[in-house]
Image: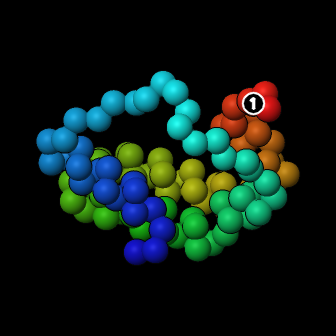
Amino acid sequence: MKRKQDLDLFSRMLNNGCYALNIDKSLVLFRSNEDNIKRRKSWTYCKSYIYVQYKIWRRGHCNLLDLAYVVIGQLVLFLAPKSLVKLISYKYLRKKYKT
């Protein structure tokens, strides 16, 4: 597994009794660009995300509805035009920081 190791790790940790909390402060600022959108829309990225979520489902750590939600979401993201993915990414997923 080359991608999504963090998702797999966190799933295994939480389902083995580890506790987790969100940190309110951003620890890393990430500059998004066109290459990020291209990677997110790649078949490799889509397939790896679905594969990891499938493994999580097979272990019994999520239900079929959770799996379906991820699979459908990733396929829609893969099939959507790059301009729509960019709009959604910048409007809803990215926070603006003053530099």
Is disc 1 placed on a helix, strand or loop? Answer: loop
Residue 77 seen in the current view? yes
Q: Quadrant of residue 56?
A: bottom left
- Residue at image position (40%, 30%) is 22
Q: Report the front residue among 29 and 62.
A: 29
| Residue 35 shown left or right of residue 66 in the figure | right
> Eyeballing the image, is 83 above or below 27?
below
Residues packed near mark 1 inside 10 Å, few (<14), some (14 to 19) or many (20 plus): few
Q: How is the image coloured?
A: rainbow
Q: Position of residue 5 (x, y in %)?
A: 40, 63
Q: Amino acid at mark 1?
A: Lys
Q: Residue 28 or 89: which is nearer the viewer?
A: 28
Whether 3 is drawn above or below 13: the answer is: below
Judge left or right: residue 78 versus residue 54: right
Q: Where does residue 12 sit, x and y in percent of width and height?
A: 24, 54
Foreground: 23 or 54? 23
Outermost residue, front side: 99
- Residue position for label 1: 96
Residue 96 percent coordinates (x, y): 75, 30
> Quick one: 64 or 86, which is closer to the camera?
86
Quarter of the picture holding the N terminus: bottom left
> Compared with residue 14, is residue 38 higher up or lower down, i.e. above or below?
below
Question: What residue is drawn where x is 52% and y is 27%?
Answer: 25
